[in-house]
Amino acid sequence: MMKGSFPLGEFQGRKTPFYFYDIPLLERTLDAVRSAVRDRPLWQVHYAVKANANPGILRRIAAAGLGADCVSGGEIRMALEAGFAPESIVYAGVGKSDWEIELALEAGIARFNVESTAELQVIEEIAARMGRVAPVCLRVNPDIGAHTHAHITTGLAENKFGIFHEMLPEAVRMALACPHVRFCGLHFHIGSQVLDMADFVALCNRINDLTARFERLDLPVGDLNVGGGLGINYEHPNHLPIADFAAYFAVFKRHLHLRAGQALHFELGRSLVGPCGSLICRVLYVKQGATRQFAVVDASMTELIRPALYHAYHRIENLSSDLPERLYDVVGPVCESSDVFAKGVSLDECRRGDLLAIRSAGAYGESMASCYNGRPLPGSFLYGETGD
Ligand SMILES: *Cc1c(COP(=O)(O)O)cnc(C)c1O
């Protein structure tokens, strides 16, 4: 029996909560990305591993030919194990430890996205000691505010990420003077869950200005990496399950003035894996409070922290009931008042044992899971896998 895209028969006997991944949807998403950039041989899309590092998901994305975008040594290891080629891996992060820099140099990754001149000096020293040359892009803080939640903007002057654009020429000169660093280009990332394409247009304009300034200063720009951030539709996961890649890439085709032979890199996370994942949980109790009715479920902020952390909205569906709808606060068992998935949402009437799907949870869900309150990590079910 199916409800929506959920094979309920296959859920029997599975321990809840678990992550359900719709692999055919992931494949269709990857196809959409590939076809949107098919006419641009110098454009490369990397997958931001932190969005979801489930080994089965990583293997699928590596097999589809995308590169990887990592933010730690652990992610570089996971990407290599999943089959990403080292020369497809880019590595960002404001605080790279020495062992992580060594691991990345050892593996022969494509790019370090360097976030400060202090980091540049450390990479130069470690590369010199190892007898290597580190390929480096400098991450620019473009001072652009993405219209998204304050916790997930990254491109403002006040954010910790990147080198402030006014200090950039000096940093590039420093990179060019490092014998064990090869300066390869500039990196940007303005934030996450960005739905207003005007934010990406602003990024293109900023990059065009920087390019002109660099040319006046006789400095090389190298390749460009515009990061990720494309948002998904959390309200309508059934009707709009694939992010608007055509509109996203069209912005860069139209507004970014690339020079001949200049490569362009993207780092997409949420838009690739968000829609294909749902957190499946069970109703433990229906509890009448003083003013509100609670559906207490066996999943919590330890499996999916986004509602508690960012007040994020996830659509919730009752997969077991066709009864008339009622209003619920859907809450987990963890001892935190913020352990709430949704307040006052309308669900088909819930009874103990019903299965609920918390939708669009494929990005920053499983990868952010914790063991707080002594809870085990959630399992996963990759549905509709072909091959392997
Ligand atoms: C998180 C991150 C991404 C991916 O962001 P999404 O919003 O998931 O697309 C890309 N680049 C960098 C540097 C990141 O930190």
Image: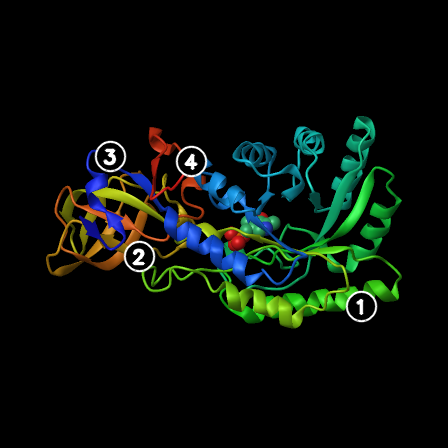
Sequence-wise first label, 3 or 4: 3
**Tag 1 secondary structure:** helix
Q: Amino acid at mark 2?
A: Arg
The Cα atoms of the two marked residues, 2 and 1, are separated by: 45 Å
Nearer the viewer's eye, disc 1 or disc 3? Answer: 3
C-alpha gap between disc 2 and disc 4: 32 Å
Pick the front one: 293 or 174: 174
Q: Nearer the viewer, mark 2 or mark 4?
A: 4
Q: Is residue 233 left or right of residue 104?
A: left
Mark 3 element type: loop
Identity, as a three-letter code, of the amino acid under mark 1: Ala
Q: Quadrant of residue 96?
A: top right
Residue 212 is tagged as 1
Q: What type is the residue that disc 3 sits on? A: Arg
Task: Indicate the position of residue 346 as horizontal and vertical percent values.
Answer: 21, 60
Q: Are marks 1 and 4 in contact (CB under 8 Å)?
A: no
- Label 2: which secondary element: loop
